[in-house]
Image (tube, rainbow, N blue to C red):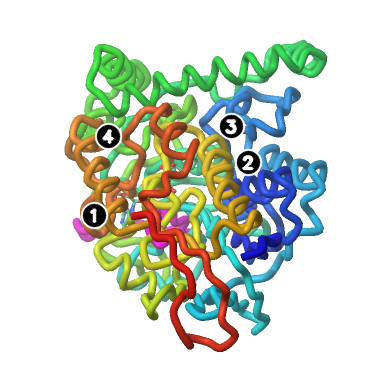
């Protein structure tokens, strides 16, 4: 079969979609379309603009390896600065013409005979593609709690990931539900402007102290801008440092104990009132959930206008929140910092693979993929930041770029006429998932807490291995783990099997 430039549809223009579009363009692929449902690029940084939004990963590492930025204002940049960075990267790399904003994908269906995907948008447009890349993000679909009466509240109810920038919070009585990284940031910010703030905490979190508003040292930007080699070296050292953090999470060690003790100390030194400290003390080990980092939260919750509420929420009334002890807490605004349906991935999009297999059926027991990217039953479809992506340890830009290069390797073989269709085997996927399950054993995420890391099937949806394993797995595709097909597509839908098949598994 003669090769040709594959038609590629990338769904999503966040961190994963930008990485993929850039890598594919760098490799000379010219037929790329990025469909993004939002009105801007940036993914999570576009959707989230709640007060206090900051990234608790230092900006000198929370960036694309291919788009270094020396001149951050802060060591931990705020949300608007990070969103500007993503917009600038897209502009500077010339990716804008590839991206269609305000274009929500509702379905993607594989045609066995034609060996193509048909991608359908909410507006009813269709795109025919040889390959589909789902770069739809992890923390994307807001989780709205099922609290009786919530819909009948008289005032505004706002989820942090759908913040209303016109909402007036100054001088208001505000209730915030949820205490993940988001809840802690939003409480810390709103406490400064609210008349009163009540923080509803079902399970307290360990909050590790760090000077999050620290500016980048004077002269850093000029130095790093002038010497790109030095900047690269700094980036590589931070990558190395992040490996230590990943190791701390994945294997017990003295380093893990040290960080855990630091988290306990952060609470003990900042909260002197034993009763409040008791209420703020989790019943699980630090680092078990995604670690919350803040230098502002403990002072904020001890301010005169703040209250920590650990009673269960019984119901929401038109004027406030009633707790299980019967008390009615009057409030003007309810903020839901209740997290995300992290395991939906590309759903509710309707994705139908080979032999009519739907992604809902394939993932009936929770999402699973081979090497975070390939799903049995779904030929010529890959995910970037898919199941088991290292949301808890290795920074997302890094794994996105590696995954994009892996996908590019398959696309190059399509372009060279070596394959028309590629699909990971069930055997390889099960083997990988078995390895994941074993490696999860000694991780800190498995030490007795609930968190968004756990899937419906009670597996932990993270990367439990070292970075080397990711580099190795994504460095070179292994044919034996895939059905690799080389055949002429047929004209009519579902009209026959492949002509020539070179299945290596
Ligand atoms: P989250 O960590 O999932 O926290 C959700 C919170 O809502 C939990 O405290 C949960 O309590 C509570 N909650 C949920 N339903 C509730 C209900 N019905 N009643 C009372 N409480 C309820 O969500 P998140 O804070 O949005 O953070 C998600 C992830 O986003 C983070 O872990 C992190 O990876 C990322 N993030 C990163 C940054 C950053 O700076 N890099 C900032 C924000 C977010 P339970 O624990 O009891 O379930």
What is the distance, in whole Å, between disc 2 and disc 4 at their CAs? 25 Å
Query: Cβ–Cβ below 8 Å for labels 1 and 4?
Result: no
Mark 1 Cβ and ligand 1 under 8 Å apart: yes
Q: Residue at x 67, y 65 (%)?
A: 7
| First-in-chain label (1 vs 4) | 4
| Camera sees residue 330 | no
Foreground pick, 378 / 188: 378
| First-in-chain label (2 vs 4) | 2
- In the image, which residues are magenta? 324-344
Q: Residue at x 50, y 75 (%)?
A: 110
Query: Cβ–Cβ below 8 Å for labels 1 and 3?
Result: no
Residue under numbered circle 1: 312
Indicate which label's residue lies in the foreground, 2 or 3.
Answer: 3
- From the image, give the main secondary structure of the stretch colored magenta: loop
Q: Quadrant of the N terminus?
A: bottom right
Question: Where is residue 74, by image quadrant?
Answer: top right
Residue under numbered circle 3: 62
Residue under numbered circle 2: 79
Query: Cβ–Cβ below 8 Å for labels 2 and 4?
Result: no
């Amino acid at each position: 079969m003669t090769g040709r430039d594959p038609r590629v549809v990338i769904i999503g223009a966040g961190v994963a979609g930008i990485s993929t579009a850039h890598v594919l363009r760098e490799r000379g692929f010219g037929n790329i379309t990025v469909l993004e449902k939002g009105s801007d690029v940036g993914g999570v940084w576009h959707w989230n603009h709640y007060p206090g939004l900051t990234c608790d990963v230092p900006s000198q590492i929370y960036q694309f390896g291919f788009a270094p930025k020396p001149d951050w204002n802060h060591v931990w940049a705020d949300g608007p600065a990070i969103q500007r960075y993503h917009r600038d990267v897209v502009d500077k790399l010339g990716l804008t013409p590839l991206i269609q904003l305000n274009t929500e994908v509702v379905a993607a269906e594989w045609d066995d005979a034609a060996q193509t995907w048909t991608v359908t948008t909410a507006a009813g447009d269709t795109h025919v593609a040889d390959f589909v890349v789902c770069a739809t993000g992890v923390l994307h679909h807001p989780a709205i709690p099922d609290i009786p009466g919530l819909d009948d509240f008289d005032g505004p109810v706002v989820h942090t990931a759908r913040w209303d920038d016109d909402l007036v919070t100054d001088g208001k009585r505000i209730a915030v539900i949820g205490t993940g990284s988001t809840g802690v940031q939003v409480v810390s910010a709103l406490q400064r402007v609210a008349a009163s703030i009540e923080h509803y905490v079902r399970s307290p979190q360990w909050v590790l102290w760090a000077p999050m508003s620290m500016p980048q040292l004077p002269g850093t930007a000029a130095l790093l801008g002038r010497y790109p080699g030095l900047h690269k070296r700094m980036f590589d050292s931070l990558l190395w440092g992040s490996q230590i953090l990943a190791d701390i999470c994945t294997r017990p060690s003295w380093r893990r104990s040290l960080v855990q003790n630091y988290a306990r100390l952060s609470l003990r030194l900042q909260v002197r009132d034993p009763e409040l400290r008791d209420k703020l003390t989790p019943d699980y080990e630090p680092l078990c959930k995604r670690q919350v980092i803040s230098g502002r939260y403990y002072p904020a919750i001890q301010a005169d206008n703040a209250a920590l509420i650990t009673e269960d929420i019984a119901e929401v009334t038109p004027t406030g929140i009633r707790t299980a002890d019967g008390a009615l807490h009057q409030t003007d605004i309810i903020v839901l910092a209740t997290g995300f349906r992290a395991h939906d991935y590309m759903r509710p999009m309707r994705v139908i693979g080979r032999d009519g297999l739907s992604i809902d059926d394939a993932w009936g027991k929770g999402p699973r993929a081979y090497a975070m990217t390939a799903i049995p039953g779904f030929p010529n479809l890959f995910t970037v930041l898919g199941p088991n992506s290292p949301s808890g340890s290795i920074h997302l830009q890094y794994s996105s770029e590696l995954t994009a290069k892996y996908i590019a390797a398959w696309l190059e073989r399509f372009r060279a006429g070596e394959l028309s269709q590629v699909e990971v085997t069930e055997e390889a996927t099960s083997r990988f998932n078995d390895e994941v399950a074993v490696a999860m054993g000694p991780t800190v995420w498995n030490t007795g807490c609930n968190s968004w890391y756990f899937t419906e099937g009670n597996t932990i949806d993270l990367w439990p291995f070292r970075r080397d394993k990711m580099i190795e797995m994504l460095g070179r595709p292994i044919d034996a783990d895939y059905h690799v097909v080389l055949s002429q597509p047929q004209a009519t839908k579902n009209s026959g099997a492949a002509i020539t098949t070179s299945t290596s598994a």
